[in-house]
Amino acid sequence: MLTAGPHQVELDGITQAFEVVGQGPPCFVHSGGPGIDSNYLRMPLVEQYMTMIYLDPIGTGKSGLLPGGDYSVAEYARRLELLRDHLDITDGFVLGHSHGGMVGLQYALDHPGRLRGLIVYNGAPVGESDLIEEACRQVAAIAERWPDRAEMVAAVREFRRAVEGQDDVHDVESYAEHMKVILPLYFADYRRTCAELGAPPVASITVYDPARKPYEWDVRSKLGAIDVPALVLVGSYDFICPPVWAQLIHAEMPGSRLIEFSDSGHFLHLEESRKFAEAVRDFSMEVRQAAGR
């Protein structure tokens, strides 16, 4: 039985923090980042239909740091399985956003038969090098789309500085400031989202691990081995995990469903929250009905 509220457990010598909210079938929610606090991913509309198990991935929030800094996608997937085993949940859903979508794909490959359904939310089948190369092309398009918005010009400049290794990110404060500047890139229309939310969105950071190493990862041509119902969600204006990656995932995974959100960037649950919740709800219900539950 899952108990609502925040929890911390020791798994393989490292603190794993998570929070349980909602009702319905269990769904492990793996946030992006990595290193960005997971509280940005709260989904109150989805919590009406599913029991959401929000993880603080290792190296993030209240979870512990990984000795050596080798935060590979495979290690994140292994940590997810450790928590799942600890909670004695034999099936259920995994919803991974951004980098968490990569973790979800890796988990499905490494632990077949352990999922009821997989939701890849603005994810990608590749790691840093190819991901950043494509993102640079998307940022060039953003610069052309918003040439007169000061916050977009500053965001494009900061992103390019980071790609060129000219940024000065070395602790929590500098990382938080970097994310604050580039955050407008992640939305289809940043000013519209700010107006709808009543305040600028925030990517909070409470932990920074200077030992974190760059990661390379690529599961292209392997995704056909994932034999589980899958929902692939992507925003048309997502620059960091654009539709090209969602389309590749969908093409390689037999039976997966792809839904593109035409008015969103990287944060569908904020930009088109009701459509996003309905897509997740409908998918979970169809999977459960197909299984006779």
Image: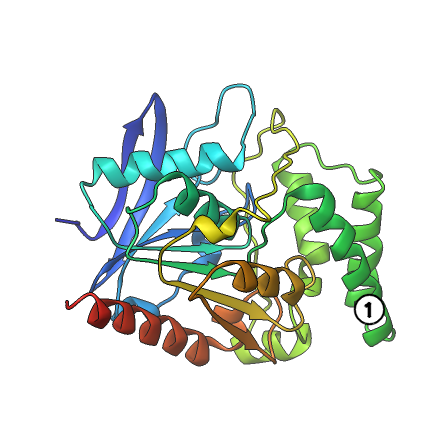
| 10, 119: nearer the viewer | 119
Left/right of residue 70 with respect to residue 111 in the rendered view: right
Residue 31 is at least partly visible in this image: no
Residue found 64% across the figure and 80% down from its top: 192
Q: Quadrant of residue 182?
A: bottom right
Label 1: few (<14), some (14–19) or many (≥20) C-alpha neighbours in 10 Å = few
Residue found 56% across the figure and 63% down from its top: 251
Q: Which residue is mark 1?
A: 141
Q: Position of residue 119 (x, y in %)?
A: 42, 60
Q: Quadrant of residue 51?
A: bottom left
Q: Position of residue 179 (x, y in %)?
A: 66, 51
| 201, 121: nearer the viewer | 121
Q: Is residue 258 above or below residue 10?
A: below
Residue found 63% across the figure and 34% down from its top: 215
Left/right of residue 115 with respect to residue 268 in the rendered view: left
| 165, 131: nearer the viewer | 131
Left/right of residue 225 with respect to residue 81 in the rendered view: right
Q: Is residue 190 above or below residue 212?
A: below
Q: Quadrant of residue 238?
A: bottom right
Residue 127 is at least partly visible in this image: yes
Q: Position of residue 21 (x, y in %)?
A: 26, 58
Q: Secondary structure at mark 1?
A: helix
